[in-house]
Image (cartoon, rainbow, N blue to C red):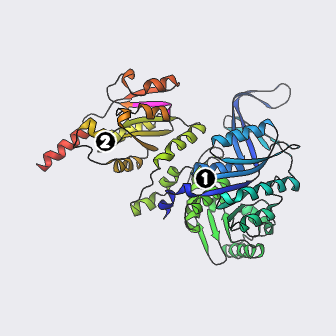
Amino acid sequence: MKLAALQQLNKAKVLVVGDVMLDRYWHGDTGRISPEAPVPVVKVSALEDKAGGAANVAKNIAHLDGKVGLLGLIGEDDNGKTLEAILTKENIESSLVNVVELPTIAKMRVISRHQQVVRLDLEEPFQLSHSQLLLERLKQEVDKYDFVLFSDYNKGALCAISDMIAVAKAAGKTVLIDPKNSDLSLYQGADFITPNLNEFKLAGGDTSSEEALTSSARELLKTSGIGAMLLTRSEQGMSLITNTEKFDFPAQVQEVSDVTGAGDTVIATLTTMLGAGMSAKDAVEVANIAAGIAVSKLGAATVSPEELSRKLGQYLRETGEHYQTPFEEVLKHITFAKQNGETIVFTNGCFDILHAGHVRYLAQAKAMGDRLVVGLNNDESISRLKGPERPINPLKERAMVLSALASVDWVIPFGSVEENDTPAKLIEMVSPDILVKGGDYKVEEIAGAEHVLNQGGKVEVLAFLDGCSTSNVIKKAQLQKS
């Protein structure tokens, strides 16, 4: 069921409503102390802008292939324009309400040697009158979506949260809340609420024992009129609690790099998986896996469907199933990876019968960057190149085997007659940072090399493993058969 739902992530239609903000990072090196005051001097070398707050929740959904809209409040300022431009690039349909008299919320961080030196917050709290403007926009947009996710950062955009929930429920939508207010009755009518342990205790939850936690959670759900609680418990994992059931999910064993934005990843993944058809229990299990992936990355990171499928390894082995990214979604995922600053490597081939030479070659190619894209000749192309008896294995099976390799992130077929059996057009679409080719080639002989070099990329030629080839495998099999 989990994998079937992973193939339907684009069916999740989610409207995120909440406190949007711009996360701005100044990166630089520190080499001395200021003569003006006892503070480090950071020589800024790079500026990075990201979607923050509720906008980061929407970004997580978009990167999971969900169809996502975003409602929030911004000022009529440059930070607001920057945030809107980021959202467009992230494939998020934003409908942000401009508030003339207040600034766009911005968190500005100075980073040196992977450490935060200082954070500057530019914000003024929005008032009920501003939230009511957002409520009117919600009424206009709610019918386009199946789920409404409220992301509360206590900045004022959700002052009218009770009325907003009523609008969403009247429209027949499933409502999820990432809360900040300790009075959970404000969220009456919600289907799911996702507090962390601290928020749970502030709301009146009892963590003195597992029994006390469960009973107090159920009492909070009953008195607040909320359907279910997903309690995130740091190193203790997560618990899904309803009036009649409780499911515990242990924390995923990961090397924790940064817990920033992990809560955003949890509720975004939960909502997307519900929208794709998963049961609540299965959706929480996947959200727990996503949280483990997210905290292993620096900053407010997102998680891709490919990463989720790999972490479902035990389930995949037991069922024999395998998640394969829909071909039409691959280019979008590559674009997201580029926006995250990841280096894209591209190679291509027939990969008709996968052998040790292929595996080593692909591992070497992946080691040159962060993500590896494999262009795969389609069946007709291989027949034209290798003869009518080839391929041995059809495209779908070859793609599945390649996708199962740890070194391969994406597989894209090519080889139409118009493409002349070369990946040149595909390479132009992917526009990788590094193009890798195996064999005894000169750079100028490699299809797509000119485009990559003109874009400032690199072209690398790798030697094949001696004695390993598909032709040799086929000959050996024929000899044994005879």
At mark 1, the secondary structure is: strand
The residue at 81%/37% (across/down) is 77
Q: Are marks 2 and 1 in contact (CB under 8 Å)?
A: no
Residue 417, quarter of picture: top left
Name the amino acid type tagged 2.
Answer: Glu
Residue 27 to residue 185: above or below = above
Residue 91, quarter of picture: top right
Residue placed furthest toward the left: 482
Residue 300 numbered tag: none
Q: Residue 126: percent from the left, percent from the top?
A: 85, 51
Q: Tell whether 242 sits left or right of 425.
A: right
Q: Which residue is mark 1?
A: 67
At mark 2, the secondary structure is: helix
Between 416 and 226, the one nearer to me in the picture: 416
Between 71 and 26, the one nearer to me in the picture: 71
Q: Residue 250: percent from the left, percent from the top?
A: 58, 63
In reply to whether residue 54 is colored magenta, the answer given is no
Tell me the CA gap for discs 2 and 1.
Answer: 34 Å
Between 145 and 436, the one nearer to me in the picture: 145
Residue 85, quarter of picture: top right
Q: Which residues are magenta?
A: 430-436
Residue 261: tell me if it is visible.
no
The numbered mark, 2 or 1, whose residue comes first in the sequence reads: 1
Q: Tell whether 117 sits left or right of 325.
A: right
Q: Residue 414: percent from the left, percent from the top?
A: 39, 39
Q: Which residue is mark 2?
A: 380
Residue placed furthest toward the bottom: 244
